[in-house]
Image: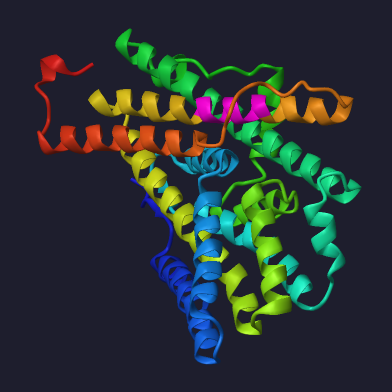
Amino acid sequence: MKPAVRTPVGSTIAIIATIAGLHVFGWGLPILAIWMGKDTLLVLGLAATAYLLGVRHAFDADHIAAIDNATRKLTGPGARFSSVGFWFSLGHSTVVIGTVALLAAGVHVLVTVIEDDTSPIRQAAGLWGVSISVLFVLAFGMVNLHSLVRLVQRRRGESAGAEPAEAGGGPTGLLFRLFRPVANLVDRPGRMYPLGLLFGLGFDTAATIGLFITAGAASFQVSWALAVALPLLFTAGMSFFDTLDGAFMARLYGWAAQHSGRHYRYNLVVTSLSIAAAVVVAIVGFSEILSQATVSNLTLPIDTTYFGFIVVGLFAVVAAVAAGTRMRGPQPQALQT
C-alpha cells in the first residue's frame, strides 16, 4: 500500500505561523497607533471592521464553492490536502495588500475608480472576477461530477459482482472534455495561489471594496500604523477562515472517500453538495455576465449573500452525523449498503 499523500508537517507549521503572524502584526499595529495618541474607539472600530470584512469575505459563495470543489478534486484514496483554502486566500490577499499599499502611497485616483460603480475599470474588473469564478468553479464541478458518476457506477458494479474495470468510467461528454484541462491546472494546493490572485483582481465584492475605501481614508487621516494594519487584518480574517474551510473539507472528504458501507453514502452526500454549490454559483455568475454583456437585466433573482454560510452549515451537519455514526461504532453487516 502506498503511503498517504498529505500536507507535509513542515508546511502545516508554516501555514499556522503565517496566519498567527498576520494576527499578531494586524492587531499589534492598531495598538501602536493608540499608543501614539490616536483615538482608541476610532482605531479599534476601523481595525475590527477590516477583520470582520475579511471573515465575511471568506464565506462568499465563490470562495466556498472554489475551495470545497478544489479540495474534493484533490482528495482521493491515500491523498488528502488541507492547505487549499490557505493558498487561495493568500493569492486573493496579495491583490488586497497591493492595492491598499498603492492607496497608502498616494495613488488617490484608485479611491475614485473603486467607489464609482460606473467607471470602466470597475465594470471591467467586476466582469473579470465573475468570469474567472464561473470558469473555475464550473470546471471543478464538472470534474467532481465525473467522480460522482464513477463512484455510483463502481458501487453498482460491485453490487452486481462485476470487476472494478467493468464498473464504468464516468461521463466523457463535451462539457467534461472542455473543462477538465481547466480544472487540471490545479493539481496541488499551491496552484490555488494564482487562482486566488485571479479572483482578487476582480474587485468583485462589497467586502473588498469596503476595505479599500476604509484603508484609503485611514491612510490619509488617521495613522500610518492603522493604514498598514487594515489589509493585514482583512487578510488575517479571510485566510484564517478560508484555511479552516479547506482543512475541514479535506478531513470530511478524506473520511467519506472510504468506499465501504456508510462511507459510500457520505461520499455521495458531500460530493453532491459540492457539485450543487458549484452549479448555483456558476449559474448566478453566468447570468451576471450576460446582464453586463448585453446591458440588460438578465440577473437571476437568486440572492447568494448568505449562500456560503448555508453550504458550510450543511457540511457541518453532515460532519456531525458522520461523527455521531463513528462514535456508535460499526453497524451490523446486515444493515450496511
Q: Is residue 107 magenta?
A: no
Instruction: Work out whether 45 lies above or below 294.
Output: below
Left or right: 77 in relation to 18 = left
- Residue 133 appears in which quarter of the rendering? top right
Q: Is residue 294 left or right of residue 87?
A: right
Q: Main secondary structure of the magenta part?
A: helix
Q: Residue furthest right?
A: 120
Judge whether residue 280 is colored magenta: yes
Pinpoint residue 297: horizontal percent, then vertical percent.
Answer: 79, 22
Query: Number of labelled discs?
Result: 0
Residue depicted at 80% across the width and 62% down the height: 111
Q: Nearer the viewer, residue 219 or 122?
A: 219
Estimate the x, y position of residue 226 in percent, counting from the top left.
60, 78
Q: Is residue 264 left or right of residue 59?
A: left
How is colour applied across the structure in the image? rainbow
Residue at the location (80% across, 25% down)? 290
**Residue 298 percent across, percent down from the top left:** 76, 21
Q: Residue furthest top?
A: 160
Q: Is residue 258 left or right of residue 205?
A: left
Please report the bounds of the magenta region as a residue range. Answer: 275-284
**Quadrant placement of the C terminus:** top left
Q: Nearer the viewer, residue 195 or 112?
A: 112
The quadrant the N terminus occupies is top left
Q: Residue at x 70, y 78 (%)?
A: 221
The location of residue 32, given as percent across then percent down, is: 52, 87
Q: Foreground: 250 or 164? A: 250
Residue ID at (73%, 73%)? 101
Q: Is residue 217 above or below residue 307?
A: below
Is 93 rendered above or below residue 195? below
